[in-house]
Image (cartoon, rainbow, N blue to C red):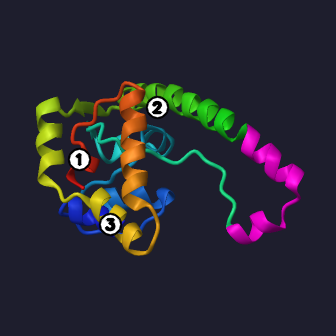
Amino acid sequence: MLALATIYATLRVSKVLPNFYKMVQTGVVDAAMLWPEAAKTFKIAEVAPYMLKADLGAVNSKTVTVNKYVWNKLPDEVKDVLQKVALKYRDHIAGVAMDRASASLEAYKAGGGTVVEMSADDRAAWAKSIPNIAVDWAKKLDAAGAPGSDMLKAYTQKLKDAGFTPVRDWAAEL
């Protein structure tokens, strides 16, 4: 989160979702980055009547994670099942999330909110203006002996192969 605060020239305020409403209402924060389902669930339109739909490429992780300590204690058959269903689970949950996002944007509007869409030119200017934390991350991993640069390049290529055109090709700056 500190890297995001650097990128967006903001001050990070620790918060949990149930507190967003009151924090915006009382002026503790001027704005917050959250996904449409959260804006709907917590009735954010009541205290924050404008939503900037910036499409920055940020995502909420819809994953099941297991730390190494727990993973090593699992029986092999459980590991096999988790690995076999992981991609199907990811794809299913991503579809559900996209459906809910659309419905949640409509609910935000119905609750009195106005959604303002960032233009492609503004998005490109914003992407160009921020530090390349992806390369910083990759180089730190490289220095620690992990293939950070290779991972970033592979990830970027996967996106391109899937038809996604990034606003800024972060990996090209390696």
Distance from disc 1 to disc 3, alpha carbons, whole Å, reads 13 Å
**Residue type at tag 2:** Ala
Assess whether mark 1 and mark 2 are in contact (beta carbons under 8 angstroms): no
On the rendered image, what quadrant is the C terminus found in?
bottom left
Residue 77 left/right relative to 134 = right
Residue 157 left/right relative to 30 = right
Residue at horizontal 84 percent and vertical 61 percent from the top: 74
* Rendering coords of residue 56 (x, y %): 29, 42
Q: Which residues are magenta?
A: 68-84
**Residue type at tag 1:** Ala
* Rendering coords of residue 9 (x, y %): 17, 63
Distance from disc 2 to disc 1, alpha carbons, whole Å, reads 31 Å
Does the magenta-highlighted stretch encompass residue 83? Answer: yes
- Label number found at residue 101: 2
Comparing marks 2 and 1, which lies closer to the viewer?
A: 1
On the rendered image, what quadrant is the N terminus found in?
bottom left
Does the magenta-highlighted stretch encompass residue 20? Answer: no
Q: Is residue 94 above or below residue 152?
A: above
Q: Nearer the viewer, residue 162 or 29?
A: 162
Badge 1 element: helix
**Residue type at tag 3:** Lys
Residue at horizontal 81 percent and vertical 44 percent from the top: 81
Question: Can the viewer see residue 81?
Answer: yes
Q: Which residue is mark 3?
A: 139
Label the magenta part by its dominant secondary structure: helix
Residue at horizontal 68 percent and vertical 66 percent from the top: 67
- Of marks 2 and 3, which one's residue comes earlier in the chain? 2
Residue at horizontal 32 percent and vertical 66 percent from the top: 139
Q: Is residue 99 above or below residue 148?
A: above
Q: Which residue is at the far bottom?
A: 144
- Of marks 1 and 3, which one's residue comes earlier in the chain? 3
